Amino acid sequence: MEIPSARPGEALPTNNPEPPAQSFPDNDPAPGRIEVESLYKSYETESGFREVIKDLSLSVTEGQVTAIMGPSGCGKSTLINLLAGYEKPNGGKISIDQKPVTGAGPDRLVVFQETALFPWLTTFENVAYGPKIRRELKGEKLDSVIMSLLRTVGLEDFRDKYPSQLSGGMQRRAELVRALVNRPKVMLLDEPFRGLDAMTRSLMRDYYLDLFERHKGTQVFVTSELDEGLLIADRLAIVTNRPGRIKKILDVALPRPRDESLRGSPEYLSLKAEALELLHEEALKSFKAGAVNSADFVGAYAAMG
Ligand SMILES: Nc1ncnc2c1ncn2[C@@H]1O[C@H](COP(=O)(O)OP(=O)(O)OP(=O)(O)O)[C@@H](O)[C@H]1O
Ligand SMILES: [Mg+2]
C-alpha cells in the first residue's frame, strides 16, 4: 500500500525546536536479551488438538528492534503472550538476561492494538501512573521526564486531556509513552498501529522511530506491514505458516535515523524483495488453508511482478 507523504497539521518531532530534557538519559531502559529455545505451544480446541508454535528458536538482541512477520494465524500473538508470561509454553524455554520467564513481570511491557489507557485519567496522569505507583520518580523530575516524552510524540498540549478527547493515533502515542516511561527491559508490541488509516499509521511509525532512536531498548514488534517492519527493524524475523517457527532472520542494516526516503534505496528494495518472497511462500500455504488476511502478501508479491 502506498503511504502518502503529506502530513496532517501536527508538528513532527523532527520539527520540534526543544531538545529532550537533560534528565531523561537516567530513565532510559536497561535493555534485556531474550533467548527462546525450541518453543512449543499447542491448544485443545473444540475442533481438536492444535499446534500453534513448534520448535521456535530466536535470539532477540538487546537494544534492538526485532520485527516479527508471518501469515495470519501463524502464532505471532501467541509468541508475544508467551514472552510476556501471560501464557505458558508446553515445551521449550524462554529467558531474559538468562533468567527463565515463568510468568508476567515488570521487566516486560506489552503494547496491544487496543487502547489500555485509563479513561478517568488525563494523558499526563496515565503516563505518570506506573512511576508513581512504584515511587521511582516524583515532582519536577517526573514532570520533566514525562513532558520530554510527550513532546517527542507531539502530545505536550494534550497533557490534561482525557483519552476520550484524543484521536485514535494520539491514544496510541500516549500508550507508547506510557510503556516507555516504565523503563521495561523489553517492550513487546503486537501490531500496535493496526486499524489506523494509512496516513496516521505512517505518522505513528515516525513517532515510534523517533522515540526508539532517542531512547533505544529491546523491542519485539509484530507487524503485518512489510514497509513498517523494514523501516523500524534492526532484524526481521519471518515466521512460517502454523505451526510457527522462525523461517529466516533478515538483518536490516539500513542507516539510522530512518525515514520514508530510504524506501527508494537499492538496499531497501533488495531486502524488501527477499522478505516478500519468503512471506509469500508462507502466505500461500496459509491462504490455501483459508486465512483471508494472508491475501495481502500474495497480492503484494504479485504486484512486484
Ligand atoms: N487460547 C486459544 N485457544 C485455542 N486456540 C488458540 C488460542 N489462542 C490462539 N489460538 C490459535 O492459535 C493460532 C495462532 O493464533 P495467533 O493469534 O497467535 O495468530 P497471529 O499470528 O497473531 O494471527 P494474526 O496475524 O491474525 O493476528 C490460531 O489458529 C488461533 O486460533
Ligand atoms: Mg495476532
Image (cartoon, rainbow, N blue to C red):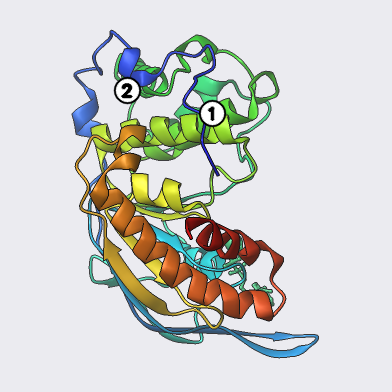
The amino acid on which the numbered mark 2 sits, given as a three-letter code, is Val
In the visual, does 143 lie left or right of 297? Answer: left
- Depth check: give the residue in front, 10 or 102: 10
Query: What quarter of the picture does the N terminus occupy?
Result: top right
Q: Can you see residue 214?
A: yes
At 23% from the left and 71% from the top, the residue drawn is 98
Q: Position of residue 92 (x, y in %)?
A: 40, 85
Q: Can you see residue 131?
A: no
The amino acid on which the numbered mark 1 sits, given as a three-letter code, is Asn
In the visual, does 96 lie left or right of 1? Answer: left
At 40% from the left and 18% from the top, the residue drawn is 12
Q: Residues within 10 Å of mark 1 (few under 14, many from 20)?
A: many
Quick one: label 2 or label 1, which is nearer the N terminus?
Answer: 1
At 63% from the left and 21% from the top, the residue drawn is 166
Query: Can you say whether 9 is above or below 267 in the image?
Result: above
Query: Can you say whether 239 is above or below 191 in the image?
Result: below
Q: Which residue has dot 2 on it?
A: 145
Query: Can you say whether 188 is above or below 37 in the image?
Result: above
Q: Which residue has dot 1 on it?
A: 126
Contact check, label 2 and label 1, Cβ < 8 Å: no
At 49% from the left and 63% from the top, the residue drawn is 80
In the visual, does 100 lie left or right of 299? Answer: left
- Depth check: give the residue in front, 290 or 154: 290
Callout 1: SS: helix
Q: Quadrant of ligand 1?
A: bottom right
Query: Can you say whether 148 is above or below 292 in the image?
Result: above
User: Alpha carbon of mark 2 to alpha carbon of mark 1: how far?
Assistant: 14 Å
